[in-house]
Amino acid sequence: MAGHTLYGASKGAVRLMSKDVAAEYASAHIGENSIHPTYTKTAMADYGAKAAGMTLQELGTKTVPMGRLAEVEGVARVVVFLASDDAAYLTGGEYVIDGGQMSSLTL
């Protein structure tokens, strides 16, 4: 996205670093996964909405196929799951929490 080069580069770095760590520690049975949330109801999203001349609700309606922003608690639930024994065999995964944004992009 225009104007977000450094932000995008850092997110890309996290994705690749997480996969490298997953490969490096898999034999020790240590899982490494990354999460990638979309706009979440935080001060950062509030700033982004204001910069775009929208409310948080408008930002969610216009940018997310599910029509709403992510909630902090929803993102936290994914983190808790990945830290639990239920996710003991998961490693190298990228968990996108975006209300369908990536699956609805057209190039």
Image (tube, helix red, strand yellow):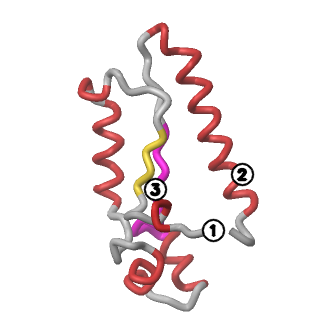
Q: Amino acid at mark 2?
A: Ala
Which of label 1 and label 2 is nearer to you? 1
The magenta region covers 34-43
**N-terminal label among 3 and 1:** 3
Q: As drawn, which residue projects farthest toward the top?
A: 27
Q: Amino acid at mark 3?
A: Pro
Whole-percent x and y of residue 96? Answer: 44, 51
The percent coordinates of residue 41 (x first, y second) are 39, 69
Tell me the crowding category of disc 3: few under 14, some 14 to 19, or many 20 or more residues within 10 angstroms, Cα based: some
Q: How far separated are the C-alphas under marks 2 and 3? A: 16 Å
Return the residue at label 3.
37
* Viewer-closest of 90 and 51: 90
Q: Badges 2 and 3: C-beta atoms under 8 Å apart?
A: no
Which mark lies nearer to you, 3 or 1?
1
**On the image, numbered disc 2 is attached to which residue?**
9
Nearer-N-terminus badge (2/3)? 2
Which residue is at 33% across, 72% downward?
66
Residue at 42% in and 81% down: 56
| Left or right side of 88 for 36 | right
Q: Is residue 79 above or below residue 92?
A: below
Q: Is residue 53 above or below residue 69?
A: below
| Residue with the mark numbered 1 | 107
Amino acid marked by disc 1: Leu
- The C terminus - image quarter: bottom right
SS state under label 3 = strand
Residue 106 versus residue 75 in the image, above or below: below
